[in-house]
Image: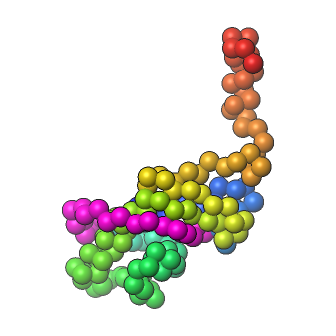
Amino acid sequence: MKVITANFVTCAVKECKTSPASFPLHFHDAELEQQELDFQPEFIRNILPRIDWEALRTISNELGFPSLPDSKPEGDALENEQTLRDLHRLLLETQVTEGKLTCGNCGHSYMIKEGIANFLLPSHLGEKYCPFVLLDHIRFANILPV
């Protein structure tokens, strides 16, 4: 899971949708891997307006990266190649291969294994029945044994 992904996900528990404490999810026991990629300064310039800077600062501190500046780079700062390279390294080249993401509101942890976060909820946290599953069950009840 690339670090940039953590800036775009939140807790899947229904009650957490409206809670500001559910974002960002917090990394725990994270194992990191650096994967060198071609430097893409234009991508960094274009994605920065979509990044929640405070969340990224929290995430980078939890993962042990040096502190990011207090404010998001803008204007002339986006022409500084070293700044863009540092952000590229953090956002795109850093992968969390193992660990967990924990919601600050409900405390639910989402496991990360082999770089993939599992956002499926156990039944006691999600809706008891998915309407699509129920619909499929009714539709195919006369075809498949229950």
Residue 25 is drawn in which quadrant? bottom right
Quadrant of the drawing holding the C terminus: top right
Residue 49, above or below 14: below
Residue 35 in magenta stretch: yes
* Residue 24 located left or right of residue 19: left
Identify the residue at horizontal 29%, vertical 62% (top origin).
35
Residue 111, above or below 67: above
| Residue 42 appears anywhere in the view | yes
Tally of marks: 0
Image position, residue 116 (x, y; %): 47, 52
* Residue 73 located left or right of residue 51: left
Residue 137, above or below 2: above
Identify the residue at horizontal 39%, vertical 84% (top origin).
66
Q: Which span of residues is magenta-colored? A: 23-43
* Colour scheme in use: rainbow
Identify the residue at horizontal 39%, vertical 62% (top origin).
95
| Residue 45 appears anywhere in the view | no
Image position, residue 16 (x, y; %): 71, 62
Residue 84 is drawn in which quadrant? bottom left
